[in-house]
Image (spheres, grey):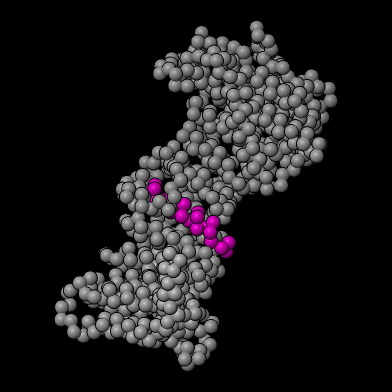
Amino acid sequence: METFSKLTSMLLHALETREPTVDLLDSFVDHWKSITNYYIVTTDDSRPVRQTDIPWRLRQMLDILVYEEKQQDVEDPGPCMEYLLQHKLLETLCTLGKAQYPPGMSQQVLLFSSKLLSQVQQPLLHLVNVYRPVQKMIRLCALPGSQTEKEEALFLLAVCSKVKQDPHTLRYILELPDQSAAKTPAPDQLHHSTDPPGAPVHGPVQSEGGLLPVLLQLTKSQKGSVCLKAYESLLLLSACSGELLCCHTQLGELLAGRLLELYSLLPLQTLDPGEVQSWPQTPWSSQSSHCSADLSSEPGHMTSFFSWFDFLDQLMIEAPEVLALTLTQCVHQLWLVNVLQPQLLHTCEQVVLGSTAVVCAAVRLVRSPSLLDRLVHFLLKTPTLTHLLLQRCNHVSDQISMVSLALVEELLQKPHRDILDVLVLSFLQSRSYLSPSAEGQEDRHPETSEDSEDLEEDPFFSDSLCFSDGPLLTPPPCSTAAPPLSGQDAAADVVNSFLCLVPVQVRSAQLLQEGGYETYVHDAHTQVTRCQALSLSWDWPSSLPPPASLSGEEDRFFEGDLLKVLFDRLGRILEQPYELNLQVTAVLSRLSAFSHPLLHEYLLNPYIHLSHSSRSLFSVLVRVMAELVQRIQQVSNLPDRLLNTRRHLLGLSHSTGLEHLVLLRGVIVLEEFCKELAAVAFVKLSLDSEELTWTGTK
């Protein structure tokens, strides 16, 4: 065996060291002359190329070129490559392919060129006798009725892969001017250098057959493999030279225009908003499965749109920053401003529902920082639009309110600091919701001063604070500045404050042996830690700012449009649809999970004493509970009805009475929401306590 191995090694060494130059060149020339001779002697113009020896001879020529390169220095073209360049073989092949002579010749030319660019390692696209015929072949791609889409996509992918290896060659492929073209090359290098002196300078105009429009056209192919290669080619190009693509091409307009084209196919007036806003991610890389679907149907249009959106998102992640910013500007102007904004401001309810649902899905699916930044800027920094979107959270149409609240919830899950700053924090920064003086108020309930006075004057509410099982509220003392909420005792006080808000008579969870707030702790911990991870880079303060000294009208606190509509909606929780209540409480729960001290104080601290006309989450809940106490007096057999309603909501029963159904569902949502807030407060205070303990022992 050892002898056989040595013999094999010697034979391989002999093959590697022999001089094949003369034989290879003669063979290469012979194959080429055989191809050209075919056109001299043939008399049958209709004979397909596959029935000739042309495909075989082209494969042999390619094999010779690849083998020759392996025997030579990669930097130094061999005699066969020199012959191909000097005699402009690619130009001739391009002409034959364009003429489709013999029939099917274009397919063979594309295959030969693809393999030449992909298998030969040395740079080629900077050579005039390579990139000129490549330019011509690109113009022959994606023509109407083409039967060679597969070969065209393969050829273009090979071109873009070569460009990715040598980004400076992108200028030649796009037919852009090159400063180095003015330099006079040596006479013996003319055949494999850049343009010779006096060559025409190509401007930055992309014709209909230019590389970028051709690739964009191929992305529309019904063949999944063709689409996929076109997508991959565009991604390769976008990673090459961002500045060149921005300044000398209309790549941004082309890509954003395609998004607009696909969006225009969506039937907004018949779309199901719930289905659209929860549309799953549609990866652009799954083109084979997408193209097999019926793209002329409504789901097909949705698939095409969100697949292209996913592709643009991925491209902006991989592209240089300058190109990503240019693309987002084009998307912003062509789609968001020119098309979406008028639809979002439309008076037709169905148009508003459809467009808002699409934006909701786009916000949820977006991953690239540049596109997310543009979406946030559009939604939250366009004054007329921003105010209207938030007002619609409290729209007369429950559907519009639902989709608007869902949009807010999606925004709150994105890694962008401006979202919370614009929606909430900018209004809380002054802390003018605090009463400027609260001496002697230690015995007041933890609610707004205005609410407290009104409720204390209400004899029914005063009489209803206590039940047979104990008091409805066990209020902690109030003070102007909230005491530090940390440690197990403080956590227990806050948790109990929220849990005790719910009157004993309307607590129905225990009737089905469901747990208390501890059943929410796991989910609350997940949400709080996610919010902490999201805000980790936002450099939030660890302590509260001092309250601002305001006077006159300036001291009237305004919680901002978002919190206003959320509190207004929460105040009507006993008369709203169940699904809408769930959406309202979901947004409030997510806001309370963030670790900013202002959010924690305003949403989760029941101890703060509020200024005149101010309200907090806790004070709104106190008012709702007061209303609940009055309204449940009208419901007979309350425990059984609550039990039946809860069983129905859990899917344990298929029938429930219609009388007081909205009220009973609202009561159940309130009970669960208070437990959820208690769990969030418990998790946040526990995490703060652990952090303080760890810091102290460090």
Tell me which residue sits at (42%, 59%) in the image. 231
Tell me which residue sits at (44%, 69%) in the image. 3
Looking at the image, is 198 positioned above or below residue 227?
A: below
Residue 272 quadrant: top left
Magenta-tinted stretch: 302-322
Give the percent coordinates (x, y) of residue 79.
41, 85
Answer with left or right where residue 566 lies relative to residue 435.
Answer: left
Looking at the image, is 88 positioned above or below residue 397?
A: below
Question: Principal SS element in the magenta part?
Answer: helix
Tell me which residue sits at (18%, 81%) in the image. 42
For the C terminus, give its image quadrant: top right
Evaluate whether residue 289 shows in this view.
yes
Tell me which residue sits at (38%, 53%) in the image. 287
User: Farthest residue toward the right?
Assistant: 439
Give the percent coordinates (x, y) of residue 114.
37, 70
Let me know if residue 119 is in the magenta part.
Answer: no
Residue 215 quadrant: bottom left
User: Farthest residue toward the bottom?
Assistant: 187
For the N terminus, give its image quadrant: bottom left
Evaluate whether residue 135 shows in this view.
no
Given residues 125 and 416, the one toward you in this image is 125
Let me know if residue 305 is in the magenta part.
Answer: yes
